[in-house]
């Protein structure tokens, strides 16, 4: 079996529906591939290398393990598609596509004890406290 295969029309349509409702510009070309080697994550999102972009005109390549993806429930599939698409960011000022890492990285056991809002609140608190500390240090240097 080949490492990469084209995805089914149903999978392509699901991705396209969600891409169309996203903030990704219409001229950003995304290639969707099935790769059974994707085993432990939802999928892989990579920015196409310059040579690949030149040869294929694709900006981003998304790989999923479609045989596994097809066995999921509809809401699970939609979650995965949105998660993968969310990694694609277009910077209009630089006219450039980048791939972002997820903004939440924690342990599932801790997240089960609390919730996502608590996690995000702690992140915001740390950013605010660090900014306040920098302001205090800057004021101390000025004196």
Image (tube, grey):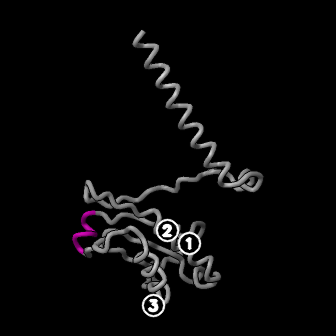
Q: Secondary structure at mark 1?
A: helix
Q: Which of the numbered marks, if any, corresponds to residue 84?
A: 2
- Estimate the spatial distance between the alpha carbons at disc 2 and disc 3, rounded to whole Å: 18 Å
**Most foreground residue, 58 or 39:** 58
Give residue 42's quadrant in the image: bottom right
Main SS, magenta region, reads helix
Quarter of the picture containing the C terminus is: top left
Whether residue 51 appears in magenta in the rendering, the answer is yes
87 over 128 or under it: above or below = below
- Check if residue 116 falls in the magenta segment: no
| Image position, residue 79 (x, y; %) | 58, 72
Q: Position of residue 47 (x, y in %)?
A: 36, 63
Which labelled disc corresponds to residue 115? Answer: none
Give whichever of discs 2 and 3 has the lower sequence position. 3
The residue carrying mark 3 is 9
Q: Residues within 10 Å of mark 3 (few under 14, many from 20)?
A: few
**Residue appearing at x 53%, y 67% in the figure:** 83
Q: Which residue is mark 1?
A: 80
Q: Residue at x 43, y 75 (%)?
A: 21
Mark 1 or mark 3: whose residue is earlier in sequence: 3
Q: Residue furthest right?
A: 113
Task: Report how far apart the C-alphas of labels 1 and 3 lie in the structure.
Answer: 17 Å
Of residues 16 and 105, the one nearer the viewer is 16
Total label count? 3
Range of magenta residues: 50-55
Does residue 120 appear to the left or right of 20 in the view shown?
right
Task: State the SS at label 2.
Answer: helix
The picture places residue 28, in percent across and down from the top left corner, at 31, 71
- Callout 2 touching callout 1 (CB < 8 Å): yes
Q: Is residue 69 above or below residue 113?
A: below
Instruction: Give the percent coordinates (x, y) of residue 2.
Output: 45, 82
């Amino acid at each position: 079996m080949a490492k990469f295969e084209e995805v089914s029309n149903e999978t392509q349509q699901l991705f396209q529906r969600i891409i169309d409702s996203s903030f990704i510009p219409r001229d950003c070309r995304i290639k969707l591939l099935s790769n059974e080697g994707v085993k432990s994550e939802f999928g892989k999102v990579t920015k196409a290398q310059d040579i690949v972009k030149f040869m294929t005109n694709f900006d981003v390549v998304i790989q999923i393990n479609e045989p596994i993806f097809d066995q999921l429930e509809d809401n699970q599939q939609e979650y995965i598609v949105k998660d993968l698409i969310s990694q694609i960011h277009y910077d209009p000022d630089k006219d450039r596509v980048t791939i972002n890492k997820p903004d939440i990285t924690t342990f599932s056991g801790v997240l089960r004890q609390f919730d996502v809002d608590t996690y995000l609140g702690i992140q915001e608190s740390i950013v605010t406290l660090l900014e306040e500390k920098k302001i205090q240090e800057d004021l101390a240097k000025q004196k």
